[in-house]
Image (cartoon, rainbow, N blue to C red):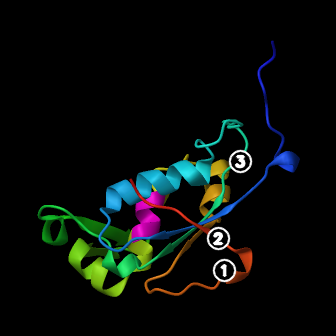
Amino acid sequence: MNTFMQKKETVDRKWYVIDAEGVNLGRLATQVATVLRGKHKATFTPHIDCGDYVIITNASKVNLTGNKLKDKIYYNHSRYAGGMRERTAGVMLEKYPVEMVERAVKGMLPKGRLGRQMIKKLFVYAGETHEQQAQKPVEMKVK
């Protein structure tokens, strides 16, 4: 019996929409990363991008447990001397909720060319509406 290896030409991609309102950020990110990677499919192949598209709505209403709103810090550096910028999770959730969710998911994907290809299938919106109605996404619940 031979091991099944999917080819990138034969990948069947679906669209999923997830409502992030009241969902813990880590639980949301792990499930989204699994779908983006394609590990939820029986035809998963590690070296092929066989995942599906994911749309996340209500990113501004995602939940953080414990003291993360004031203790967790996000860092950016401009690559210039003194260019370090620090923001708490509370500031990120208030001003940049889309970037916060994208960073959480991106950290759980493979690093390198394959991970950069997978993150392009993620669409995050701070509000209720999204621009992908034409793709007829299926609603997915976070466990």
Classed neighbour count for the residue bearing mark 1: other residues with Cα under 10 Å, few (<14), some (14–19), many (≥20):
few
Q: Which residues are magenta?
A: 101-105
Residue 83 pos. (x, y %): 35, 76
Q: Disc 3 marks which residue? A: 50
| Identity, as a three-letter code, of the amino acid under mark 2 | Pro
Identify the element where label 1 is drawn.
loop
Q: Report the residue at 26% width, 76% height from top.
A: 87
The correct choice, above or below, for 142 with respect to 17 in the image is above
Q: What is the magenta segment's predominant secondary structure? A: helix
Tag 2's secondary structure? loop
Instruction: Tell me if label 1 and label 3 are in contact, CB under 8 Å.
Output: no
Front-most of 109 and 45?
Answer: 45
Q: Nearer the viewer, residue 81 or 36?
A: 36
Pointer 2: what residue?
Answer: 137
Please provide percent x and percent y for residue 109. 52, 50
Q: Are marks 1 and 2 in contact (CB under 8 Å)?
A: yes
Query: For numbered disc 3, what is the local secondary structure?
Result: loop
| In front: label 1 or label 3 | 1
Q: Hey, which quadrant is residue 86 in on the image?
A: bottom left
* Residue beneath the point at 44% across and 87% down: 127
Quarter of the figure that contains the N terminus: top right
Q: CA distance from mark 1 to mark 2?
A: 8 Å
- Name the mark on residue 132: 1
Give percent across and percent down for residue 103: 43, 64
Q: Quadrant of residue 65?
A: bottom left
x, y (%) of residue 99?
43, 75
- Asked whether residue 129 is in view, the answer is yes
